[in-house]
Image: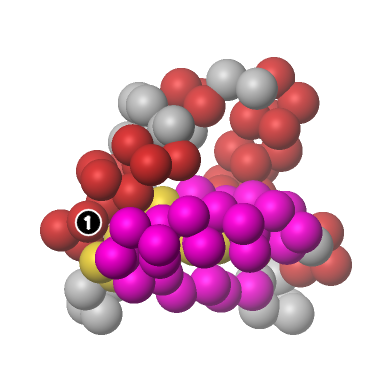
Amino acid sequence: MHDVNLPTAQAIIVEHTGDLSLLQASDDDYDGDDGYDRLVTVRAFEAGAQAARVRDAGIPVRVEFPDEDIDGAASGMVTLYVPKGSLDEARELLGISL
């Protein structure tokens, strides 16, 4: 599996199994130079509620849609990113344990 498709694949597996422990640890997550880490990839209709829960706790959230040229971009999946120092707190708010 190509690493570009990993977030989408993980989100689909977690959605079907309900097992959030299947998400990879942040060591393998996006580690760009913008100061944000990938929190979770979810279906677009779920992103608003999850982003709001994190923002209500005072953590900034960035929501990104996949590039159109990536296979599966029409899947309706989006990725939520939070500042690197807030990743553990945001995961706890959403009940994500690794």
Quadrant of image for the N terminus:
top right
The structure residue drawn at horizontal position 15% and vertical position 58%, both measured from the top left corner, is 85
Residue 71: percent from the left, percent from the top?
A: 76, 64
**Amino acid carrying mark 1 in the image:** Ser
Q: What residue occupies the far left of the structure in this picture?
A: 85
| Span shown in magenta | 40-65
**How many residues crowd around disc 1 within 10 Å: few (fewer than 14), some, or many (20 or more)?**
some
How far across and how far down the image is residue 7, in percent?
56, 49
**Residue corresponding to mark 1:** 86
Check the picture and name the quadrant holding the C terminus: top left
Q: Is residue 49 left or right of residue 82?
A: right
12 with respect to 19 (left or right): right
Residue located 63% across and 30% down the image? 14
24 above or below 52? above
The answer to whether any part of residue 2 appears in the image is no
Query: Looking at the rendering, which quadrant does residue 28 occupy?
Result: top left
Measuring 64% from the left and 41% from the top, which residue is drawn there?
A: 11
Q: What is the x, y in percent for residue 42?
A: 64, 51
Relative depth, front residue between 67 and 65: 65
Q: Does the stretch in magenta take in 74?
A: no
In the displayed image of the protein, which residue is found farthest to the front?
56
Mark count = 1
Residue 60 in magenta stretch: yes
Q: Is residue 95 above or below residue 9?
A: above
Nearest the eye: 15 or 1: 15
Task: Say which residue appears at 29% left-offset and 65% top-offset.
Answer: 58
- Residue 44 in view of the camera: yes
Task: Locate residue 72, reporting x and y percent.
Answer: 78, 60
